[in-house]
Image (cartoon, rainbow, N blue to C red):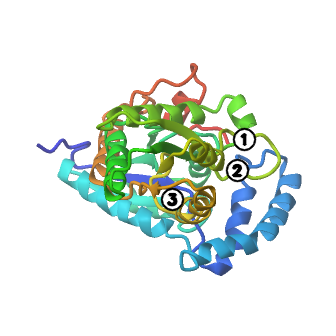
Amino acid sequence: MARDMAPSRKIAVVLTNLGGPDGPKAVRPFLFNLFSDPAIIDLPGWARIPLAALIAGLRAKAARANYALMGGASPLLAETQAQAGALQAALADRSPGSTVRVFIAMRYWSPDTRETAQAVETFDPDEVLLLPLYPQYSTTTTASSFAAWNRAYRGRAPVRAVCCYPVAEGLVEAHAARIEEAWAAAGRPDKVRLLFSAHGLPQKVIDAGDPYQLQVEATAQAVAQRLNKPWDWQVCYQSRVGPMAWLGPSTPEAIEAAATHGLGVVIAPIAFVSEHVETLVELDHDYAALAGRLGCAPYVRAPALGVQPAFIEALAELAMQAMDQPIGAHPGSGHVCASAGCCGCAKRTTGETAA
């Protein structure tokens, strides 16, 4: 039975995501946008901007080569558009008395936050809901996207935001289904270790109170418990760059350890809900080649969630729950943060995240 989130209301749901270059010429400016974000490089603007330009220039060639493996562009926008369409259909079924439109706001490329904020202003909704495609909260992802929205949006509508949903029922169910499908397609090998691979962060970000690591571990624990059999499993972190200490173990280290123990691996991208360069290149090419060199076989990769029905239903339920709450109430999935206020939930739900 349909449950109308707000009868006869116009509601804008804004999916926030990272974004990705839409062609070879976009790679360098995309990288500049990424590294000029103070949430990524915590330096004053006079130092951060030239450093971002330098890093973008140095990394552009290698990044273009990676995107060339995917046809020259990131698939992230198309993936997110498919998720937005599926979510809009799910919300229309649940809320037939309201006009609900799902928008996409990419943090570092098109459609960027300012463009989307203007589109939402033109739509002129009664309410806005920010719904991140980052299940686990981090200052480097969710907080950065919300801060960009706060700077850009000038509409009349009140804004709510879902902060995080690391153990949402549908998210956990969808990951478990993807893992079991991939494992079955590989012939149900028994000598394998399940690696939950998440994008890494510098250790100093976690030490400063970012709850990302704890939430990734919570997701992995919930998924492992949902699987139909006990697994030998481990959380690991990919995409480490630079000399500073990052979260560990790294995914390459975890693959090497599995090989040493005579095991293959099933890798699940636990913090990614869409296919993009970290899954299609880093996992499918770079780490697969590493596993081959180390004799780590089989090497099985579970797909990202995409429009997996349980995941879309999880997003729809999160939206419904959030829109049932008064402005200022916490609309998350019930996950308790590591310490009170460690990720600013009260501020995030009122759209007051600090830049």
Task: Compare residues 311 and 291 and report the one nearer the observer.
Answer: 291
Q: Residues within 10 Å of mark 1 (few under 14, many from 20)?
A: many
Disc 2 marks which residue?
Answer: 240
Task: Compare residues 56 and 87 and report the one nearer the observer.
Answer: 56
Q: CA distance from mark 2 to mark 3?
A: 26 Å
Count of numbered labels shown in the rendering? 3
Quarter of the view holding residue 236:
top right
Which amino acid does the dot numbered 1 rest on?
Trp
The percent coordinates of residue 308 (x first, y second) are 31, 55
- The quadrant in which the C terminus is found is top right
Q: CA distance from mark 1 to mark 3?
A: 28 Å
- CB-based contact (under 8 Å), mark 2 and mark 1: yes
Q: Is residue 105 visible?
A: yes
Residue at position x 38%, y 58% in the image: 306
In the rendered structure, find residue 246 and report the number of the disc placed on it.
1
- The quadrant in which the N terminus is found is top left
In the displayed structure, 270 sits above or below 20; it is: above
In the displayed structure, 53 sits above or below 133; it is: below
Q: CA distance from mark 2 to mark 1?
A: 7 Å
Task: Compare residues 81 and 112 and report the one nearer the observer.
Answer: 81
Going by the picture, which residue comes out furthest to the front? Answer: 262
Q: Earlier in the sequence, mark 2 or mark 3?
A: 3
Nearer to us of marks 2 and 3 is: 2
Task: Compare residues 201 and 118 and report the one nearer the observer.
Answer: 201
Which amino acid does the dot numbered 2 rest on?
Arg
Q: Is residue 95 visible?
A: no
Disc 3 marks which residue?
Answer: 105
Tell me the element at label 1: loop
The percent coordinates of residue 87 (x first, y second) are 31, 55
Nearer to us of marks 1 and 3 is: 1
Residue at position x 36%, y 52% in the image: 183
